[in-house]
Image (cartoon, rainbow, N blue to C red):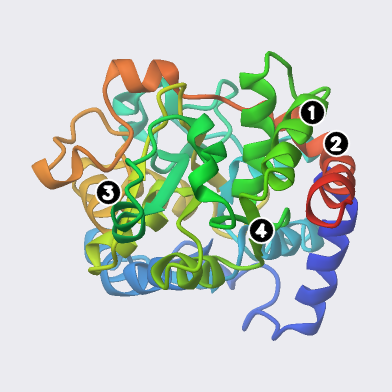
Amino acid sequence: MIGKRRLAAAMAATTMATALPWRGPARAADAESSVVFAGYGGTLEQFLRDKIVPEFKKATGIDMKLVIGTALSNYAKVVATRSTPEIDVYWSNELTHAAGKQQGLYAPLDTAVVTNLSDVIDIARDPDNIGVASYLLATGIEYNTKALAGAGIPPPRSWNDLWNPKLKGKVALYSFDIAYSQDLVAIMTRLAGGKETDIGPGIKKIRSLRDSGNLTMFATTPAELDNMMVQAQAWVTVNGSTRAFILKDHGAPIDFVFPDEGAGFFTNYLDPVKNAPHPKAAQILINFLLGPDIQLAIAENTVAAPINRKVTLPPDLIAKVPHGDELMKKMIHIDRVVMNRDLDNWAEQWNREIQTGH
């Protein structure tokens, strides 16, 4: 189960939101002529509509219908409709992927259809063949290059650089509801020699960042954090690599570093929903998304590392995405099963000790 209170809130919001434009299984006549994909909004939605939907239709003749939401709100829809699923493929995050597997919400991949799976790198494959990573990202340190240069502060290279005394009042983090702060707790725990079963060391470390006076700002949405960083209200934060590099590519004085101790491993999974109305089309869509041409397009449009080993990274992406044996070996993998089980408790500790603690 994902955090009970978070799932309940997401399901309540889903109930109040506009319903999907169809209910239950499709008519027999068009049972496999369409596929329903639950994905993300913003720039990812635009990419899906402009590139993926028309290319998939051209390649397969299948209409791709989108359900747009967050990972948690879409997960709530999958849970709420599990007896009569309406979504065929759910673009999960690592936490909802683990939670859905535990609840038996996803179907295994059909290797006879998902033939591109043989070209997927090992780190991106699910050990039980339930879903597959769509790309690879990293959780690391984002910083405002102009602000740091103006203050004579060198670019950060280590997680410990967040505690640089020259950054007093200039570090921001997401509130705990955003996945990157959840991951930061686990990362700090791991670096302190602990495990996700006891996050005390990580909470203590992040509290010391607040107590130092460096950490003074919390953002409740990615857009809010983007604004803090671009406007130089905050100079340094913890964020996903793709978010930082998209800002940089749009001309903002922003850069990102994969910390020397290791960046956090982060990905989103393509999960076929069990008993979905279009099971074959779901498998065909996943295979399409794993193909080298589409993987390259995903990499270029989301600033993420492709998971198909046949893809050659363009030169402008090499420094922006996690790749190469050395970097991959150092990446910090989080025990999502334990995180999922204890997330409400993690939130309580965060709120008590860090964001609202005294």
Residue placed farthest to the left in the image?
315
Residue, x 32% and y 68% (percent of image)?
Answer: 47
Q: Nearer the viewer, mark 2 or mark 1?
A: 1
Q: Position of residue 8 (x, y in %)?
A: 88, 62
Q: CA distance from mark 2 to mark 1?
A: 10 Å
Q: Residues within 10 Å of mark 2 (few under 14, many from 20)?
A: some
Which amino acid is tagged 4? Thr
Mark 2 vs 1, N-terminal side:
1
- Provide the residue designation for mark 1: 199
Q: CA distance from mark 4 to mark 2?
A: 26 Å
- Provide the residue designation for mark 3: 299
Mark 3 vs 2, N-terminal side:
3
Q: Position of residue 305 (x, y in %)?
A: 31, 39
Q: Nearer the viewer, mark 4 or mark 2?
A: 4
Q: Position of residue 128 (x, y in %)?
A: 60, 23
Q: Nearer the viewer, mark 1 or mark 4?
A: 4
Mark 1 vs 4, N-terminal side:
1
- Provide the residue designation for mark 2: 342
Name the mark on residue 216: 4
Residue, x 51% and y 49% (percent of image)?
Answer: 167
Q: CA distance from mark 3 to mark 1?
A: 33 Å
Which amino acid is tagged 2? Asp
Report the front residue among 251 and 278: 251
Secondary element at image label 1: loop
Q: Is residue 161 left or right of residue 150?
A: right
Q: CA distance from mark 3 to mark 2?
A: 33 Å
Q: How many marks?
A: 4
Q: Is residue 193 left or right of residue 340?
A: left
Q: Quadrant of residue 327?
A: top left
Is the C-beta separation of discs 2 and 1 under 8 Å? yes
